[in-house]
């Protein structure tokens, strides 16, 4: 009996050791744990906690059917998350619409139970075990019911891709989708603007933001009078933005600080 136990233990140990060198796959995970979207509310944690490496920021991996004029409170929209990595064959993601403090904004609705599910008290959308395989890219869709009491919602997303289920060479990407309530730009008239000014104003090309807040902790959006965001900049050089490509007209410049505070001022483009 002792010999059988010994042989079984040695055989299992050899399989684990062999697997560590040959890359034996041990099955697919059924989604991520809650709290790894890279959002401030998740303490900036993301897929690298388990997969290692460094996360790369990307644009446009989360899209929506919300029109350019903004979302309507209580309205249901479709959100699409896409993970792209040439050569990868397995993909994962976690997405959550959150306030700066991590509160869930709106309601998430699963529309494809084969590929996606909710975790963390329905605060996060993530993949299912049957929704990970693809070639070079994979997308997931779900619905979102817009909240009734906020003007701005940010969808935070963390994405991971790998080859045949092995962690070696995994890639992690972070992205955001910022959405505004319809008519929010009109409400900018009521925002504190003694904190923010721009010059020259009117302007032709480069505009300097006059604010005491460090530029590395803020982001700037420019909206036209229809409420459409026409410029978005997350990294400021010398507190400057280039508006040369914008048509002549009146715009709102909105500054969002790291703590979630928002300030706005008018800009006239010549």
Image: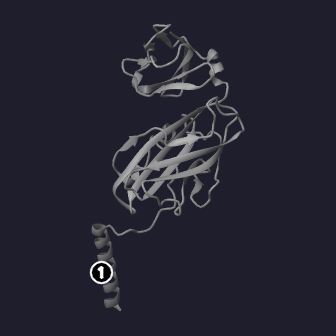
Residue 5: quarter of image:
bottom left
Q: Position of residue 97 (x, y in %)?
A: 58, 41
Q: In this view, does 106 lie to the left or right of 11?
A: right
Question: Compared to 150, does 159 lie above or below?
Answer: below
Count every numbered label the image shows and give the total: 1
Using the rendered view, name the quadrant where residue 241 is placed.
top left
Q: Name the residue under label 1.
A: 10
Q: On the picture, is 67 further left or further right than 240?
A: right
Where is residue 242 shown, x and y percent of the image?
43, 18
Residue 161 is situated, as x and y percent measured from the top left of the image, at: 41, 53
Horizontal and vertical percent position of residue 39: 49, 39
Write the residue at 56% across / 44% down.
96
Seen in the picture, residue 9 relative to 114 is either above or below; the reply is: below
Q: At x 31% / y 81%, what residue is drawn?
A: 11
Report the residue at 59% width, 44% height from top.
79
Q: In this view, does 1 lie above or below 60?
A: below
Rendered position, 154 above or below 4: above
Q: Residues within 10 Å of mark 1 (few under 14, many from 20)?
A: few
Q: Please name the colour scheme applied to the rendered image.
A: one colour
- Residue beneath the point at 63% across and 15% down: 189
**Left or right of 140: which side holds 200?**
left
């Amino acid at each position: 009996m002792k010999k059988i136990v010994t042989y079984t233990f040695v055989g299992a140990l050899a399989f684990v050791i062999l697997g560590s060198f040959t890359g034996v796959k041990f099955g697919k995970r059924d989604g991520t744990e809650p709290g790894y979207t890279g959002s401030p509310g998740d303490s900036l944690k993301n897929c690298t906690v388990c997969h290692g490496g460094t996360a790369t920021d990307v644009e446009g991996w989360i899209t929506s059917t919300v029109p350019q004029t903004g979302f309507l409170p209580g309205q249901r929209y479709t959100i699409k998350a896409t993970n792209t990595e040439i050569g990868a064959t397995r993909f994962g993601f976690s997405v959550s619409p959150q306030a700066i403090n991590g509160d869930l904004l709106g309601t998430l609705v699963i529309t494809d139970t084969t590929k996606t599910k909710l975790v963390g008290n329905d605060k996060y959308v993530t993949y299912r075990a049957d929704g990970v395989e693809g070639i070079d890219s994979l997308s997931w869709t779900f619905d979102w019911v817009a909240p009734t009491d906020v003007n701005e919602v940010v969808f935070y997303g963390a994405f991971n891709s790998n080859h045949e289920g092995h962690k070696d060479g995994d890639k992690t990407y972070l992205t955001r989708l910022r959405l505004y309530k319809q008519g929010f730009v009109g409400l900018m008239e009521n925002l504190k603007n003694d904190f923010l000014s721009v010059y020259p104003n009117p302007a032709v090309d480069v505009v300097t933001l006059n604010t005491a807040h460090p530029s590395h902790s803020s982001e700037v959006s420019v909206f036209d009078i229809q409420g459409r965001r026409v410029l978005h900049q997350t990294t400021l050089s010398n507190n400057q933005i280039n508006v040369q490509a914008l048509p002549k007209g009146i715009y709102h410049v909105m500054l969002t600080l790291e703590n979630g505070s928002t300030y706005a001022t008018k800009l006239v483009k010549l």
